[in-house]
Image (spheres, helix red, strand yellow):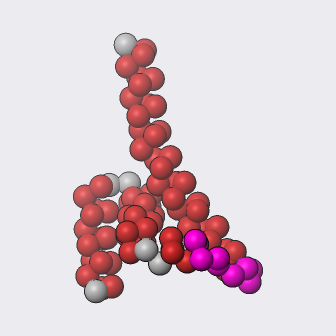
């Protein structure tokens, strides 16, 4: 029973680590540009990639809302506004 509790906690923790890492990367990019550090070509390719933008917005929404269905709803609205 104890191992089931540990596995359940570990799985929930992994689900939150990936969005936190993506949001941290995006936050660092915003701070660096605010500090006047220009993006290089690789950073521009990554940050302007629509898939990365959608992924980042989804991660931010998920970390704030903590509900995958509401996250999908909010990201759908964001996507419609961006089109």
Taking the image as shown, residue 26 lies to the left or right of residue 60, namely right
Seen from the viewer's position, the closer of residues 54 and 50 is 50
Residue found farthest to the top: 1
Residue 30 lies in quadrant: bottom right
Q: Which residue sits at x=50%, y=46%?
A: 17
- Residue plotted at (30% across, 70% down): 74
The magenta span reads 34-43
Depicted 36 relative to depicted 60: above or below: below
Query: To which quarter of the image does residue 59 belong?
Result: bottom left
Q: Is residue 79 above or below residue 16?
A: below
Query: Which of the 4 image quarters holds residue 28?
Result: bottom right
**Closest to the observer, 9 or 29:** 29
The number of discs equals 0
Q: Could you tell whether 77 is left or right of 33 in the image?
A: left
Q: Which residue is situated farthest in the front direction here?
A: 41
Q: Residue, x 28% and y 86% (percent of image)?
A: 83
**Left or right: where 49 falls relative to 36:** left
Residue 51 sits above or below residue 22 on the image: below
Residue 10, how many percent across, how many down?
A: 46, 31
**x and y percentages locating residue 77 in the rendered image:** 27, 77
**Residue 6 within the magenta-colored segment of the rendering:** no
**Vertical order, 33 against 29 (above or below):** below
Which residue is drawn at the image coordinates 25% and 68% (left, top)?
73
Q: Report whether residue 21 is seen.
A: yes
Residue 35 drawn in magenta: yes
User: Residue 43's x, y, as percent?
Assistant: 58, 72
């Amino acid at each position: 029973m104890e191992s089931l509790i540990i596995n359940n906690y570990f799985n929930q923790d992994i689900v939150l680590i990936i969005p936190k890492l993506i949001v941290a990367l995006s936050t660092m990019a915003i701070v660096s540009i605010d500090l006047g550090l220009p993006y290089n070509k690789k950073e521009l390719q990554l940050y302007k990639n629509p898939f990365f933008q959608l992924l980042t917005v989804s991660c931010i929404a998920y970390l704030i809302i903590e509900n995958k269905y509401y996250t999908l709803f909010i990201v759908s609205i964001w996507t419609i506004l961006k089109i």
